Amino acid sequence: MKPLSDSQSYFDCVSQTIEKLPLMVIERVSEMLLAAYERRRTVFLFGNGGSAALASHFACDLGKGTVNGSRKRFQVVALTEQLLNLARSQDVAFAISGSGNSLNVLKALNTARQEEMFTIGLTGFVGGKMKELCDACIIIPSENMQVIEDLHLCVAHSLFTSLRSKIAQHVSSDLRVPSAMFVRASAK
């Protein structure tokens, strides 16, 4: 990979990576999160460092930004280490890791699977060990951590925007989410 030597080369790299984003997986994750919202399941977001900051940011977006006149709110929590104490079967564990190999994130995903939660990942590079533990895993196809982190925020904002729109469309209706939205990766 050619080193990024100036602002132009960095933004060129970001633009090229955007063109390769797995849009179908991102939309699947949006549907999984919508199903969790409709079923009043809790979404637990977690990561390390910058990924932990994104988990907190995304939790705020989902918890407050999707209200749109409805009294119903997303059940969402940004975690540091409390997953086992709070997790229930059918909740969602949403892991964020640039490399996909953060040990405590992998441990949390293993815990989530043991508790029969649905698992979602947001990572980069080629997915790391995390991708095998996720029912749906969004992989930013880049080898540059800064590009990966930038696009993690873009993916979170795209999910938020999509969910806010879907929720607003159905505020006054009784949306029924098909159970097929939640299918374990191994069952596909």
Image (cartoon, helix red, strand yellow):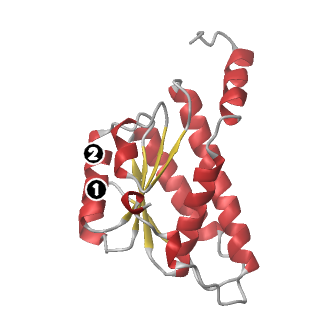
- Eyeballing the image, is 181 above or below 49? below
Q: Nearer the viewer, residue 66 or 129?
A: 129
The residue sitting at 59% across, 29% down in the picture is 147
Q: Which residue is mark 1?
A: 81
- Eyeballing the image, is 98 above or below 174? above
Q: Earlier in the sequence, mark 2 or mark 1?
A: 1
Q: Which mark is residue 179?
A: none
- Horizontal and vertical percent position of residue 43: 45, 67
Q: SS of the residue at dot 1?
A: loop
Q: Which residue is mark 2?
A: 104
The residue sitting at 56% across, 32% down in the picture is 141
Res. 131 image quadrant: top left
Q: Is residue 113 left or right of residue 174?
A: left
Which of the image's four quarters has the C terminus? bottom left
Q: SS of the residue at dot 2?
A: helix
Q: Nearer the viewer, residue 172 or 35?
A: 35
Residue at the extreme front: 188
Q: Is residue 25 left or right of residue 85?
A: right
The reply to whether dot 2 and dot 1 touch (C-beta < 8 Å) is yes
Q: Nearer the viewer, mark 2 or mark 1?
A: 2
Give the Cα separation between the discs numbered 2 and 1: 9 Å
| Residue type pointed to by label 2 | Asn
Q: Is residue 107 left or right of residue 143?
A: left
Q: Nearer the viewer, residue 110 or 49?
A: 110
| Residue type pointed to by label 1 | Glu
Q: Is residue 126 left or right of residue 80?
A: right
